[in-house]
RNA sequence: GUCCCCAUCGUCUAGUCAGGUCUAGGACACCAGCCUUUCACGCUGGCGACGGGGGUUCGAAUCCCCCUGGGGACGCCA
């Protein structure tokens, strides 16, 4: 569909038959507009996902806008974090990102249009006066709002005189937000006041900048957190003042911490990149996030393609959802189990690198992933559980060694070592046959030999099937570790 | 304080708009059992919810009102 987006217009002009089709293709434009002031947290990522899904679902465009008008709080690092997070998740955007900090000319121009039309005015009220006004309102237990002191003064401040520009909000009537998620929400204009659109330093305020941006970027659908719902009537009035059509809004509820509290931006555990570090798969993170507040019947597991195919704003929940790390882990496990060995190995590579272990794409390594994937919830867990295939462990698990590395198991280990030494066809099948014979000869249970061997080879009592574990550890290493175990038992006795 | 939003198992949710098929379904987690050479996977079963009160109706999780609880907004932050 990318190609259609790029070539849509020219094809549309050439071919009448497809014209109508491409009008639909070009109609949806959504956007994600984070402010670069810290971690990109989970709630933001989910609104980005919903916007992206919506655009992809309707073959529209998805745009990125960095809201960095607050120079004091915006950072380069945070901007990079946004790019990295989206890139890791595979949430791609269709045009170059828009930076609000580079669009001040457009905001001035927009303000001038309103000023010239008498829809905005200069205000010379000082910050102190405004603060006092607000404090007074709070004291009188009424909604804090500007008292319109400068509204009809027709001020023309000279250069150098500090003045803000305010929007002349309608004083009567209602504004109805027709919302894709919240249905229609009605506000009285009397509840709204004349918001500042340009600060004394000339910079635009949020509610004004976004309206100019939505218009310039041609956004048709604005999907964002419901903390913006109360801003929406002001923005709608602004759209009207510009004589522009109002985009379709969709206000999605926030995401709460597992304890049901508001997520804090400072919390590291709410950053998606942290989830990457913990070994979660981007597809699984998307799957988890999409189900948080949205559903498609009883389906729990979605590929990205399915999300796009089924995503539907009508099924977005109106109530906030709490994060459940255990369900994330389960979903990640499910996605991990669907990976082919080659894919799994490739995705695990960076995590092996972190531990200084080199893994190439060999048949053996693929098989290691294959036998571990149902036992691992995350890539980190997979790597942690597989190190003994690559490097020798430092020490036996104390309890495991005490229980299984004993004088009783010693002869069995020695005997197995002998049969493995002469084994020509090194495969789990033939290894299994050797163990089976041993078990038969000594009239013991399979576990009587499997557990001591497991401890000898892996250091602990947990591993995949013992035959395949032996195979994958390799003949040379297996014999070496078996010998060490026998020695260990001897030194323990003496 | 004012305005706005929300409310089904511990959690994510289906069901709510078009009231009956809901003694409320699924999933995660938890518990028990089966499978089994350990750990997992898998399978079977169990525990577990319509916040409260009024209406409307033959019938309410579903519609209306009130209460309670939670959240948001009310910035020269975004």
Image (cartoon, helix red, strand yellow):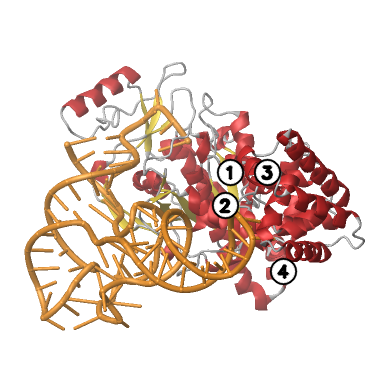
Task: State whether discs 4 and 3 lie on one chain.
Answer: yes
Which quadrant holds the C terminus of chain A?
Answer: top right
Pick whichever of labels 4 and 3 is earlier in the sequence. 4
**A298 relative to B77, above or below:** below
**A438 relative to B68, above or below:** below
In front of the other: A39 or A411: A411
Q: Given contact means CB atoms under 8 Å apart, are the residues at marks 1 and 2 in contact?
A: yes
- Label 4 packing within 10 angstroms: few (<14), some (14-19), many (20+): some
In the image: residue A275, left or right of residue A153: right
Residue at x 76%, y 59% (from the top left corner): A468
Pick whichever of labels 1 and 3 is earlier in the sequence. 1
Q: How far is disc 4 from disc 2 in space, using C-alphas?
A: 37 Å
Q: How far is disc 1 from disc 2 in space, using C-alphas?
A: 8 Å
In the image: residue A449, left or right of residue A121: right
Identify the residue at the far front of this view: A494
Q: Is residue A362 visible?
A: yes
Which quadrant holds the N terminus of chain A?
Answer: bottom right
- Mark 1 falls on what kind of element? helix
- Label 3 packing within 10 angstroms: few (<14), some (14-19), many (20+): some
- Mark 4 falls on what kind of element? helix
Query: Which numbered mark, 4 or 3, is in the foreground of this view?
Result: 3
Q: How far is disc 4 from disc 3 in space, using C-alphas?
A: 53 Å
Residue matched to label 4: A11
Pick whichever of labels 3 and 2 is earlier in the sequence. 2
Task: State whether discs 4 and 2 lie on one chain.
Answer: yes
Residue matched to label 1: A275
Residue matched to label 3: A384
Image position, residue A315 (x, y; %): 43, 64
């Amino acid at each position: 569909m990318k190609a259609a987006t790029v070539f849509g217009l020219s094809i549309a002009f050439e071919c009448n038959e497809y014209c109508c089709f491409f009008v639909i293709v070009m109609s949806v434009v959504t956007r994600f507009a984070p402010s670069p002031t810290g971690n990109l947290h989970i709630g933001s990522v989910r609104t980005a996902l919903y916007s992206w899904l919506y655009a992809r679902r309707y073959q529209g465009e998805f745009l990125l806008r960095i809201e960095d008008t607050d120079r004091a709080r915006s950072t380069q690092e945070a901007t990079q974090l946004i790019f990295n997070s989206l890139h890791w998740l595979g949430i791609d955007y269709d045009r170059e990102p828009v930076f609000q900090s580079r669009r001040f000319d457009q905001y001035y121009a927009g303000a001038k249009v309103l000023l010239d039309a008498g829809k905005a005015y200069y205000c010379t009220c000082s910050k102190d006066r405004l603060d006092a006004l607000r404090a007074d309102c709070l004291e009188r237990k009424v909604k804090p709002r500007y008292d319109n002191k400068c509204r009809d003064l027709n001020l023309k401040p000279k250069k150098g005189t500090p003045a803000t520009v305010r929007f002349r909000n309608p004083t009567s009537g209602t504004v109805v937000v027709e919302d894709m998620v919240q249905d229609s929400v009605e506000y009285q204009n009397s509840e709204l006041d004349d918001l500042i659109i340009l600060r004394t330093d000339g910079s635009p305020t949020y509610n004004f900048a976004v309206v100019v941006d939505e218009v310039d970027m041609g956004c048709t659908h604005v999907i964002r957190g419901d903390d913006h719902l109360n801003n929406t009537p002001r923005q709608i009035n602004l759209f009207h003042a510009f004589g522009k059509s109002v985009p379709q809004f969709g206000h999605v509820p926030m995401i709460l911490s597992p304890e049901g509290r508001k997520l804090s931006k400072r919390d590291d555990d709410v950053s998606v990149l942290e989830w990457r570090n913990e070994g979660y798969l981007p597809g699984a993170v998307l799957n988890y996030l999409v189900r948080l507040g949205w559903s498609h019947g009883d389906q729990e597991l979605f590929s990205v393609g399915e999300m796009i195919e089924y995503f539907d704003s009508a099924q977005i929940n109106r109530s906030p959802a709490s994060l459940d790390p255990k369900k994330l882990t389960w979903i990640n496990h499910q996605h991990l189990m669907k990976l082919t060995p080659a894919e799994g190995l490739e995705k695990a590579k960076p995590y092996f690198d972190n531990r200084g272990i080199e893994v190439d794409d060999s048949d053996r390594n693929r098989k290691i992933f294959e036998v571990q994937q149902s036992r691992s919830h995350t890539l980190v867990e997979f790597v942690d559980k597989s190190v003994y295939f690559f490097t020798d462990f430092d020490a036996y698990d104390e309890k495991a060694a005490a229980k299984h590395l004993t004088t009783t198991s010693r002869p069995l280990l020695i005997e197995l070592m002998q049969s493995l030494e002469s084994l020509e066809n090194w495969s789990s099948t033939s290894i299994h046959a050797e163990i089976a014979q041993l078990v038969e000869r000594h009239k013991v249970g399979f576990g009587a030999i499997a557990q001591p061997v497991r401890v000898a080879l892996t250091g602990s009592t947990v591993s995949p099937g013992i035959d395949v574990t032996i195979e994958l550890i390799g003949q040379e290493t297996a014999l070496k570790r078996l010998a060490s175990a026998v020695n260990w038992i001897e030194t323990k006795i003496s």
